[in-house]
Amino acid sequence: MHFVVCAKQIPDPETPPSAFKIDPQKNEVIPAQGIAPVLSQFDSIAAEAALRLKEAAGDSKITVISMGAESAQAAIKQVLAMGADEGLLLNDPAFTKGDPHTTAKVLTAAVQKLGDVDAVFCGRQAADWDWGQTGLLMAEGLGWPSAIIAKGVALDGQQLSVERVLEDGYETAQAPLPAVVTVSNEFGEPRYPKLQQIMQAARKTVTTWTAADLGLDAAEVGEAGSRLRLEKLFIPEKEGKVELMEGDTATEKAQALVKALQGAKVL
Amino acid sequence: MASNALVVGELAEGELNATTLELIGAASRLGASNITVALLGGGASGAASKAFEGGATKVLTSDDASYDEFRGDQWVAAVQNAVEQASPDVILLAQSHVGRELAPRLAFRLDTGAAMDCLNVEDDGGAVKATRSVYGGNAMATYSFVTSPAIVTVRAKAQDPLEPNAGASGETGELPGASDSRTTIAGREIVEAAGLQLQDASIVVSGGRGLGAPEGFQVVEELAKALGADRAAVGASRAACDLGWYPPSQQVGLTGKVVTPDLYIAVAISGASQHMAGCSGAKTIVAINKDPEANIFQFARYGIVGDYKEMVPALTEAIKAAK
């Protein structure tokens, strides 16, 4: 079996809101000083799902793919350290400022070029732009079935069985390979690589493919090929006028709160 | 101006759900003169009257019960048929398990773009613009569409329905029955919390990682009980759910449920943007946290700085005494 994990490097979502800044002219997030970008958490869980399938299936290979800048090598290396076999960076100036449509187009072209892929694993959404579209757009582009927002994955021969999270419960969906799966946090914690694995991953060579390598024209990727245009990026105003309850004891503070809520006709 | 809108409706137990009426409201505010609602599954044609009362001008239905269990490939084929019939400039869907899957698939097939989980959608001089929360709620982004139709999924309760127009009617049409699916649903388990549902509660009391242990939810539950079992429900942050302290069905946040109660009490929740995306629509937020620097106090109207182990039982007693 050959599994692909799609990995995205993003600004650390744990960045304190006070350090979160945007450039309103360029409609871009300004990287917070001293806070390194990270692998999107949902993608590390997608890697965990692929690794568990690889361990169960035996004789399998995992390729981790990231579309991004040269710095995205760090995200690739992290998944390699977790146990993926090969790394592939899709890097081209033409890929920047795209939308889900163009991102999926580039990733789909890479999966097609690899040729022998049995399943693609993505995070349910990336924790920066929170679209939740890439996996589904890839499934459409590849013509494969998909199962999104997975909390469990099992393989029985060529049949994939995916436990999915719904708003009000769970369902088990079955689809034949090849297929696309997007994985949610309910799947569980991803593994932490050991130091030795991190050192081995650091020595691995990551292949880079450009738009030309993928047979893609600059006009159909990145900003030029996008179906959506970002008109405005802004930080919403917060009220920031909290009224803190005064009192010497817990009871006094609690009574002050009840009084305040009654006064505001909330209680 | 968007003259033709297509709303992909959803049924719950054969009845039109509340979000569908919100989507019709959004379509109307976009200035659409033709609002077509597509309904799939058992009871669809019977639910048409409620869609007309909610502002639909045309309703397309298929009563095929195969649609009751949502499968993306079957639904997308039916909605493509509805697109051919309605020629929409804008397609509105809920940010539900249906819309999450259908919107990207439809975008691919119509070679256009989809904006997901939008809070607002507006007509800006003839162009559809959609605004959504990004970076876990730290920022907002407004998008326009390079291609047509514009596909937008809308967050539940972000839009208001229209005043119902009793007895309204309109044109009806048919959608094809379900095609074969490559996906089999081997089982489906509905996990409903006992009693009042989170989204229906007028008060939500939520606990977070700061509770320190699953036992912490006991005092949270006692507070909710004191506030009234008929109006208060218990929620949890993603961190608390991921730790297994509370059922994932009660998760409030970007990847959980979005609640808009009159009163939201956040207990030992730091206020990560991811969480705030699920509760910032509450009318009044109260924060109880021992860290006076916690982000939650940026969003709260009232706050208590202190250990929840003391503060929450004290609040429970104060509420009981005030009754």
Image (cartoon, grey):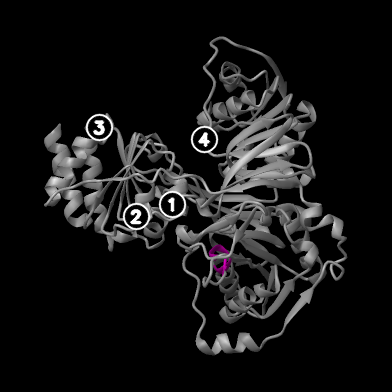
Q: Identify the secondary structure beneath mark 2.
A: loop
- Looking at the image, tell me whether mark 2 or mark 4 is earlier in sequence order: 4
Amino acid type shown at disc 1: His
As measured in the structure, the alpha-carbon distance from the residue carrying label 4 to the one carrying label 1 is: 16 Å
Do callouts 2 and 4 mark residues in contact (Cβ within 8 Å)? no
Q: Quadrant of the N terminus of chain B?
A: top right
Q: Say if B190 sits above or below A78 in the image.
A: above
Residue A41: in magenta span: yes
Q: Identify the secondary structure beneath mark 3.
A: loop
Residue extending furthest toward the front? A25
Q: Nearer the viewer, residue B130 or B112?
A: B130
As measured in the structure, the alpha-carbon distance from the residue carrying label 2 to the one carrying label 1 is: 9 Å
Q: Which residues are magenta?
A: A38-44
Q: Are marks 3 and 2 on the same chain?
A: no
Q: Are marks 1 and 3 on the same chain?
A: no
| Residue B240, quarter of picture | bottom left
